[in-house]
Image (tube, rainbow, N blue to C red):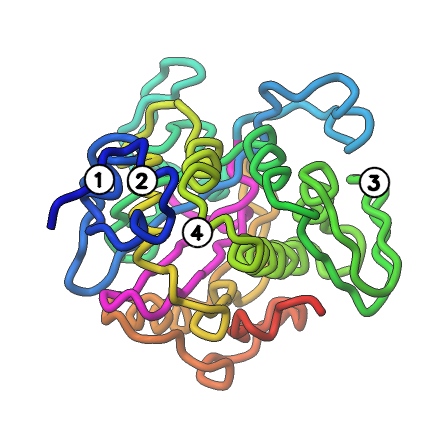
Amino acid sequence: MRFPHPWRLLLAPAALLALAPGALASALGGPSELPYPARGLNLLVVGTDSRAGITADEKERFRLGGQDCDCADVVMLVHVSAANDRVSVVSLPRDSLVELPGPHTDRRTGKVHDAHLAKLNAAHAEGGSSLSVETVEAVTGLRVHRFLAVDFRRFMDAVDQVDGGVPICTAKPLKDPATGLDLAVGTTRVDGGGGLQYVRSRKADGEMDFGRIRKQHKFVVNMLDRLRSGGILDDPARLRALASTLRGTAAADRGVTAAELLVLATRLKEVGPSRTEFATVPVRGFNPLVEGVGSTVGWDEEGAAEVFARLRADRPLPPGDAVAPSTLSVADYEPARGSSLICP
């Protein structure tokens, strides 16, 4: 097959999306080495609390005035099946008690630390992408093939590229004084700032971080649905801009490139919401206080092992009734089909 020149591809979306993945990446941003593992691809996505590039006005409007630690507020393990016909997303609560592998160098101080207990979100603060990847691999037993970190600025800018905003729907009013979230019953379309308020909110419904994780799942599904229905997935120039926004320019261990995000988008172009599933790792409850660490979340080790065994085998997540209930009702394990999270 003879491929058109890149400038012509930008004028011919259908032809571009028909290209082989390697040719597509070369046409739209350089080489791609996105792996094609026999048992599926694992992408670790973290949302950091970095406020770099946030303006003073945005800090005031969206309640972003606190100090950041470049910690991972969001930790999602995304598994793409080997057949590219299913996506499983498992969120790992940021306050999960884990052991950070050692020795590692603290990027903030230059000190070398031995292995020590910490909250999961501290892995990114202490050791960036490399320690985040190493920690998640250790606690899940899964190989992380690619890593993506998205801070506040890039999240807002990416959402602002969605025509008409992203729909958020709620059956009860949601009001959170910490983030400024104030949603009436029904469906509201939000821009980047409003979306950030929503995915950061954990005081609006009494469900703590577990409710926030469910909000994040709903937001991801509805944003992807808008990208599909709004035609961005069929517009190479806009898709390239979105991939570049999400990726940014920072170096990262096993960091996914913008070109690889484009390849991934073509692989998953036909995967609709009904073939996606979202869950939080099974949680037992809160751990006893750990000195120097504080209040942490303890996983249901047996349930978590079953979840990660399914992903290692490239199988769908286990159903909710296969895992024992949590001591915290708001933390019960219950996978949700993406199609059930779509707003009207």
Q: Residue at x 48, y 75 (%)?
A: 274
Indicate which disc residue 9 carries: 2
Secondary structure type for disc 1 = loop
For marks 3 and 2 on the same chain, the one whose residue lies earlier in the sequence: 2
Q: Position of residue 84 (x, y in %)?
A: 29, 65
For marks 4 and 2 on the same chain, the one whose residue lies earlier in the sequence: 2
Q: Is residue 149 visible?
A: no
Task: Please name the amino acid that badge 1 sits on.
Answer: Pro
Indicate which disc residue 180 carries: 3
Foreground residue among 237 and 258: 237
Q: Position of residue 222 (x, y in %)?
A: 60, 59
Q: Vertically, is 263 above or below 280?
A: above
For marks 1 and 4 on the same chain, the one whose residue lies earlier in the sequence: 1
Q: Residues within 10 Å of mark 1 (few under 14, many from 20)?
A: some
Which residue corresponds to mark 4? 234
Which residue corresponds to mark 1? 4
For marks 3 and 1 on the same chain, the one whose residue lies earlier in the sequence: 1
**Where, quadrant-wise, is the C terminus in this rendering?**
bottom right
Q: Position of residue 91 (x, y in %)?
A: 49, 57
Secondary structure type for disc 3 = loop
Q: Disc 2 to disc 1, how far (Cα)? A: 6 Å
Q: Disc 3 to disc 1, how far (Cα)? A: 49 Å
Kindly indicate whether the residue at mark 1 contacts the one at mark 2 (C-beta within 8 angstroms).
Answer: yes
Instruction: Please identify, in this view, whether the residue under mark 1 or under mark 4 is nearer the observer.
Output: 1
Q: Residue at x 74, y 47 (%)?
A: 190
